[in-house]
Image (tube, rainbow, N blue to C red):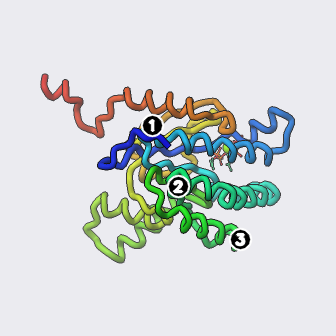
Amino acid sequence: MQSTRQDSEPGLHVAIVMDGNGRWATARGLPRRRGHEAGARAVRGIVETAPTLGIGLLTLYAFSADNWKRPPREVGALLALFRRYLDGECERLRANGVRLSIIGRRDRLPPSLLAAVERAELDTARGAELHLRIAIDYSGRDAIIAAAARARLIDSEMTREGFATLVAAAQHGGDARDVDLLIRTGGERRLSDFMLWEAAYAELSFTTRAWPDFTGAMLAAAVEDFRGRNRRFGALPDVAVAG
Ligand code: IPE
Ligand code: IPE
Ligand code: MG
């Protein structure tokens, strides 16, 4: 796989809310689960394009803690799909140097899915081209609550960096980096409890394109747009300081 990433830099952190699967299917007269299947197929192209764009960490929102509120049939179809994805893609991910982690709660996952998660993480642990994190049963608020509970036990003088490590640890995150670019497909313009701590200074990118139709070229366009933005983090741009 070609990569523009330098060994010395970790690369961009891009996070994506993969939304619009259900509407994509409904618009085609298909059951919603077919939209989720098409969505899972779309992941491959994005994962293969990401390292060529200088992305080192890619966090994909697949299932929120609130998605348990959906009808049991849809939830069941999604959980079965995650398991098939993990078992089916693992070899390819490993061949492409992708390290896969699942973030979120694990105690509510069916044992067969949990086993697939642990297998896939172990099999891809040496991947160094890209760290792919898929969020399943994830809640940004719950991650902050869990981190706050630990912080009280550990240190009352907690720094932002120290707390970020706890937020990441609270959801098996492994990497406490802030989000550089947060993309949401499917037309909604909200975070839906995703990366609440990590997205404090994320650049936001919204597209009406449904996730199953989101391509590597669209990711490239979003990253190019991101690179043209002026991130200030509360300070003044260099030109204003000089003046
Ligand atoms: C995103 O697609 C996938 C999950 C939330 C699991 P949706 O299922 O939310 O699709 P829409 O938003 O209903 O179209
Ligand atoms: C957010 O999408 C979760 C995922 C994409 C996995 P939702 O479709 O669940 O979000 P809302 O309900 O529109 O806010
Ligand atoms: Mg949705």
Residue 69 appears anywhere in the view: no
Determine the residue positioned at 45% across, 50% down: 129
- Name the residue that disc number 3 marks: 112
Mark 3: amino acid? Ser
- Name the residue that disc number 2 marks: 133
Q: Position of residue 230 (x, y in %)?
A: 33, 29
Q: Which mark is residue 53?
A: 1
- Which of 122/158 is in front? 122
The answer as to whether callout 3 falls within 8 Å of ligand 1 is: no
Q: Position of residue 99 (x, y in %)?
A: 50, 57
Q: Residues within 10 Å of mark 2 (few under 14, many from 20)?
A: many
Residue 99 appears anywhere in the view: yes
Mark 2: amino acid? Arg
Name above or below for residue 180 compared with residue 131: above
Name above or below for residue 26 compared with residue 157: above
- Rounded to the nearest whole Å, what is the CA distance between mark 1 and mark 2? 17 Å
